[in-house]
Amino acid sequence: MALTRTVAVLGCGPSGTATAITMTHAGLDVILIDPDRAPDWEPGEGLPAVAAGALRTLGVWPAFQTAGHLRSSGFLSCWGSDEPAFRSAMLDPRGPSWQLDRARFVRMLRTAAGSPAARRLTGARRDGSVWTMSFADDNPPITVDFVVDATGRGSVLARLLNVHRRVDSRLVGIAAVLANPDPADAANLLEAVPYGWWYVSRVPGDRLVVALFTDASIAGRDRLTALESWTLMLGATRRAGRRAGWPRLRMLSALHTAASGSSALERFAGPGWLAVGDAACAHDPLSARGLHDALTGGIAAGEAIAGGSIDDYASDVAAGYHRYLTELDWYYRQETRFPGTPFWTARQSQS
Ligand SMILES: Cc1cc2nc3c(=O)[nH]c(=O)nc-3n(C[C@H](O)[C@H](O)[C@H](O)COP(=O)(O)OP(=O)(O)OC[C@H]3O[C@@H](n4cnc5c(N)ncnc54)[C@H](O)[C@@H]3O)c2cc1C
């Protein structure tokens, strides 16, 4: 059946759902599309307290507050010096950040946005001002007037349209969920090592996400995506291994490797389409801003489509990504403990 005067949102993660909710509030017809696979891994994401504003705007703040996400007390940072520094959440006037249960968070947003059609986009063609979208598994095509690419780092629509994606770093995260040996410890941990950095974060259910972030070339060379080497490296850290319960690690998941570096499309919108969230530009998890940008970017995208300026939206995304790269470089340059090692040298050459 042909559908007209509608907007298709491809991808129902945080950015796609935020875009859809905003457009629905503005009275547009929205079709949500996502293969809707159950998430197969847990990134251990932190959501800064400032995101409460976006959650209120989207009308999900009451549901969020009662969903059982954890509050962090701050984090222990072993980054620029041998002495660990505790950065208390009390120092942030907006309060502590949240440690999310990812599946629960996305479920909440999808409940507010409406159920997506369980489809995976395979083709998109625009004739005049009408898009025809085609899907895998013999799902019938649909026609729409505007398309939002919210498909994450894969930026599926932009790729079909041959929009180039600039890759600014080849960081990968190699992560697993473990039983938390000390659930009363509400702090997260960040530890720099010669080959990258480790992040240990609490997630609901007395679990920890333990993640190693390194350059893809180092991960390949040192076989860091293999459980044996990952575990050995974790055991050799000063603090991360101890926090995770090494040597008696209780693994609750397999290792999962995810692209985690900075990348962005060369343009964020075109005739009849725009990209939002990670599909537009993806951030290094060190910045802890992917989710907040996905939510606020979704709201801005929805407002632009509902009558604002798509050009202004695209310029704001470009300016935001540029600012982010500058801030990220500053943060990595604080590292002085491992000069000349491949990871930190690679970071310098990407600056
Ligand atoms: C290891 C790691 C740790 C992170 N930690 C943090 C953190 O602590 N704090 C933080 O703020 N951010 C963090 N992030 C970033 C954060 O996860 C992302 O920025 C955020 O999920 C982006 O949301 P999104 O909706 O744009 O994309 P996604 O969440 O990637 O959602 C994309 C959606 O598109 C769908 N899709 C894919 N292909 C198709 C297709 N062909 N057709 C239709 N739909 C499709 C997918 O099923 C998915 O539902 C982390 C990321 C990683 C990798």
Image (spheres, rainbow, N blue to C red):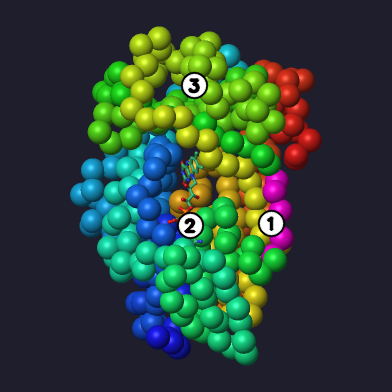
In this picture, is 326 found above or below 181? below
Neighbours of disc 3 within 10 Å: few (<14), some (14-19), many (20+): some
Q: Amino acid at mark 2?
A: Ala
Whether the residue under disc 2 has CB within 8 Å of ligand 1: yes
Q: Per the image, is 171 magenta?
A: no
Q: Judge from the rendering whether residue 265 lies leftward or rightward of residue 147; answer left or right.
A: right
Which segment did they paint magenta? 163-168
On residue 165, the disc is 1
On residue 294, the disc is 2
In this picture, is 174 found above or below 30? above
On residue 218, the disc is none
User: Would you say residue 101 is visible in this rendering?
Assistant: yes
Instruction: Indicate which disc, 2 or 1, sits on the residue closer to the N terminus.
Output: 1
Q: Which residue in the protein does label 3 denote? A: 227
Mark 2 secondary-structure assignment: helix
Residues at marks 3 and 2, CA–CA distance in whole angstroms? 31 Å
Q: Position of residue 20 (x, y in %)?
A: 40, 70
Residue that protrudes farthest toward the front in the picture: 138
Q: Nearer the viewer, mark 3 or mark 2?
A: 3
